[in-house]
Image: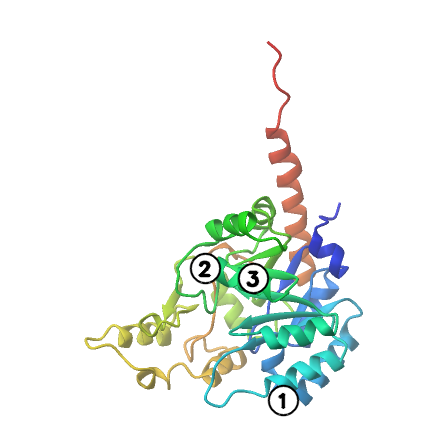
């Protein structure tokens, strides 16, 4: 029996499971596989080098699935920022119905999406950011706990607290992200008030993920202790897989007198990270992974993963938790 939530009903999907945006991973192959499995697959806009290339990737995804899928776009300050307005225009003109946003000051872009009747899911790492997203009119927020891959913010608050706080504080629905990868996590997220889960690392470790198998095998072998936090001294924390390069970066940051970004820039370039996914040398560059690696022990298809997660969550909710509620004894 499917688990029906505000997310599944609004988007017309089977499972309350979203594949979040992932640089170099969120391609048509990945998004279509998740959508065909009954979840919500998401293309990563900035993985495509130009807005025109994004239009082609959207078209390609439509040849691979007739199910709903979305597009992620992350807005970050940069010396030479990408043409965000043109990417947003491409998303709108190509008829995308769901967008995942992340990053700084998305307000003007969110307004354009909402004017086009697009459902907006905004990723947040704190309740204050979630409240700000609520004020600008997003439909869902995705609450990212400290366990997550990528940028967990600087507050270091885990998902258990953030999700319970979100349920008490927000008036819009929310998703749970960071540390989710199995049915137990899905059941827990729903119990904490979420309408579904948003996963990245878990979907990297599926048959269809467009990355080298050596990366998937490294995730399977990894434990919950096999991630590293870089850029702590620069107040731009990033959680990545613990390897030779990330260990070196952390050591440089801890040197007496600290470090500047220039000291580590050659080690952390995005192109080196992308090459890891292509050539399979997991020590060649830094690549993001969340603490959920400690819960991943196989490389299933997206279909098997989504079906297993929903079935396991249902069993926990109905059989385990349901049986804990007993009639009051009559004395």
Q: Is residue 307 visible?
A: yes
Residue 268 picture location, percent across and down? 40, 81
Element class at badge 2: helix
- Going from N to C along the chain, the mark reached first, 3 or 2, is 3
Instruction: Quickly name the residue at label 3.
Output: 202
Q: Determine the residue positioned at 57% across, 65% down.
A: 133
Quarter of the image for residue 48 reads bottom right
* CA separation in Å, label 1 and label 2: 32 Å
For the point 41% across and 76% down, the residue is 283
Residue 80 image point, x, y percent: 49, 90
> In the orientation shown, which residue stands out farthest toward the top?
331
Q: Real-space Cα distance between discs 3 and 2?
A: 10 Å
Find disc 2 in the rendering and name its residue.
291
Q: Is residue 311 left or right of residue 246?
A: right
Quarter holding the C terminus is top right
Seen at 69% across and 53% down, the residue is 307
Chain-order first, disc 3 or disc 1: 1
| x and y, in percent, of residue 90 in the image | 70, 83
Nearest to viewer (mark 3 / mark 1): 1
Q: Is residue 121 above or below residue 53?
A: above
- Frontmost of labels 1 and 2 is 1
| Residue corresponding to mark 1 | 50
The Cα–Cα distance between marks 3 and 1, rounded to whole angstroms, is 28 Å
- Specify the farthest residue to the front: 135
Q: Residues within 10 Å of mark 1 (few under 14, many from 20)?
A: some
Name the one closer to the observer, 241 or 323: 323
Give the left or right position of residue 32, taking residue 225 as reference.
right
Given residues 136 and 182, the one toward you in this image is 136
């Amino acid at each position: 029996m499917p688990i029906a939530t505000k997310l599944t009903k609004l988007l017309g999907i089977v499972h309350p499971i979203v594949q979040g945006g992932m640089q170099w991973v969120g391609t048509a192959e990945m998004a279509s596989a998740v959508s065909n499995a009954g979840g919500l697959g998401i293309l990563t806009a900035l993985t495509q080098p130009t807005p025109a290339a994004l239009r082609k990737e959207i078209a390609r995804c439509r040849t691979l699935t007739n199910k709903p899928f979305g597009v992620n776009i992350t807005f970050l300050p940069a010396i030479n920022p990408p043409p965000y307005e043109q990417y947003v225009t491409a998303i709108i003109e190509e008829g995308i119905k769901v967008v995942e946003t992340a990053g700084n000051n998305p307000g003007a872009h969110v307004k354009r999406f909402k004017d086009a009747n697009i459902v907006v899911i905004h990723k947040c790492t704190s309740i204050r950011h979630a409240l700000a997203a609520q004020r600008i009119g997003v439909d869902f927020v995705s609450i990212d706990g400290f366990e997550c891959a990528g940028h967990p913010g600087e507050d270091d608050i885990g998902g258990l607290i953030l999700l319970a706080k979100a349920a008490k504080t927000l008036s819009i629905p929310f998703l749970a992200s960071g540390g989710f990868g199995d049915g137990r996590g899905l059941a827990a997220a729903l119990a904490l008030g979420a309408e579904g889960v948003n996963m990245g690392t878990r979907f990297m470790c599926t048959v269809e993920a467009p990355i080298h198998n050596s990366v998937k095998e490294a995730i399977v072998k990894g434990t919950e202790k096999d991630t590293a936090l870089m850029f702590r001294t620069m107040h731009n924390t990033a959680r990545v897989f613990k390897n030779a390069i990330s260990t070196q970066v952390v050591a440089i940051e801890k040197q007496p007198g600290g470090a500047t970004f220039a000291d580590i820039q050659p080690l952390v370039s995005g192109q080196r990270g992308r090459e890891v996914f292509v050539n399979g040398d997991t020590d060649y560059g830094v690549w993001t992974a969340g603490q959920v690696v400690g819960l991943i022990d196989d490389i299933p298809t997206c279909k098997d993963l989504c079906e297993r997660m929903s079935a396991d969550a249902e069993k926990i909710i109905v059989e385990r938790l349901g049986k804990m509620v007993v009639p009051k004894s009559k004395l």
